[in-house]
Amino acid sequence: MEHSELDPTADVEDRDYESALRPKRLAEFEGQPRVREQLGLVLDAARHRGTAPDHVLLSGPPGLGKTTLAMIIAAELGTGLRISSGPAIQHAGDLAAILSGLADGDVLFLDEIHRLSRPAEEMLYLAMEDFRVDVIVGKGPGATAIPIELPPFTLVGATTRAGLLPGPLRDRFGFTAQLDFYAVGDLTGIVAASAGKLGVPIDADAQGEIARRSRGTPRIANRLLRRVRDFAQVRGHARVDRGVSRAALELYEVDERGLDRLDRAVLDALCRLFDGGPVGLSTLALSVGEEVETVSEVAEPFLIREGMLVRTPRGRVATRAAYAHLGMTAPSTNPALFD
Ligand SMILES: Nc1ncnc2c1ncn2[C@@H]1O[C@H](COP(=O)(O)OP(=O)(O)OP(=O)(O)O)[C@@H](O)[C@H]1O
């Protein structure tokens, strides 16, 4: 699949920039006021008691700041941080090695924790609860479990969907934070802070222009800012104003609501070719020349979130907002259309 500027998952270029752009302390973390306040309390209480805080589960879509928060937790506590992920831990032994290397009070960040293997997951239960792992030595009837004591640590688990976690794992987290998509005002703040770090002179309304097109996602906001910076540099604009940001984003085919070419093609086919639907997913995908999965996993979730498309048992249906966005009049003859 062609890489889109609006893909919320990280690519290599993002990883290079992200460490530079990450807020380092909780006070610099924009948005998510509830999560910030609750987490701040958990950390303050732990600092007061002089103990490691409860294990923390962070859930939410890609690019909303889970890794950033894990790093902030370690920085706020002044402890070490170990980073790994569910898919990187193949065997329980891999996890045992990570756990036994932790120092007192360390934070262990496990990304995509829902993808841990079963044996690793079971080892984690014991580690989270009793700060112990049982390493099995030998095979068959002669096998023995050697207990290894672990120092107290805080596990920060991240998952895109908390619902995917088995109940017993979920229950072992003392604090769960659900990250939501960001409001435009918060994203504007993120763009401003990132522009400052990158040394890009930018006007306030250009920041807002980028924020509005970033699909509620800081990673996308930072990426669009870099594209706008490229544009300004190459075309010789010393300062990014509204006009420069608009021209750059137009070039990258990111429209005013954050839709890209594929999103618009899907809406266009749905509204123009199929009169608003309902139309089956495979027919819709065929008409825009894309794979079924690309349409259903890349374009549709955002269009649904924006209230432009609805999935029904009879197929995909457009909403009046979709027609309005395309600058078309919704047909009065289609009773299936959604408001
Ligand atoms: N609240 C925030 N304030 C400022 N910058 C943020 C915030 N949240 C995320 N960012 C920035 O967005 C980028 C992506 O964040 P991060 O890597 O933490 O996302 P993630 O949720 O861990 O994504 P993934 O699930 O794909 O790993 C980083 O550059 C980070 O600095």
Image: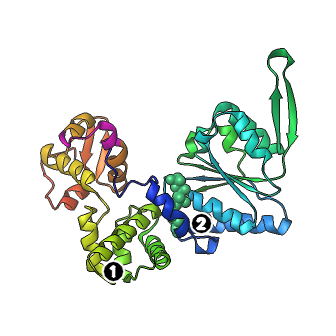
Residue labelled with disc 1: 240
Image marks 2 and 1: residues in contact by CB distance under 8 Å: no
Q: Earlier in the sequence, mark 2 or mark 1?
A: 2
Q: Residue at x 69, y 35 (%)?
A: 120
- SS class, disc 2: helix
- SS class, disc 1: loop
Residue labelled with disc 2: 34
Residue 218: tell me if it is visible: yes
- Residue 287: percent from left, percent from top: 18, 40
Q: Which secondary structure dominates the residues rendered in magenta?
A: helix
- Residue 197: percent from left, percent from top: 50, 76
Relative side of 21 to 239, left or right: right
Residue 31: tell me if it is visible: no
Dot 1, crowdedness within 10 Å: few (<14), some or many (≥20)? Answer: many
- Residue 180 magenta: no
What range of the chain is rendered magenta? 287-296
Q: Is mark 2 within 8 Å of ligand 1?
A: no
Quarter of the rendering containing residue 29 = bottom right
- Residue 94: percent from left, percent from top: 70, 38
Mark 1: which amino acid? Val
Q: Residue at x 50, y 61 (%)?
A: 16
Foreground tag (2 vs 1) = 1
Farthest residue in the top direction?
A: 141
Q: Residue at x 37, y 83 (%)?
A: 203
Query: Quadrant where the C terminus lies?
Result: bottom left
Which label number is shown at residue 61?
none
Relative side of 197 to 117, left or right: left
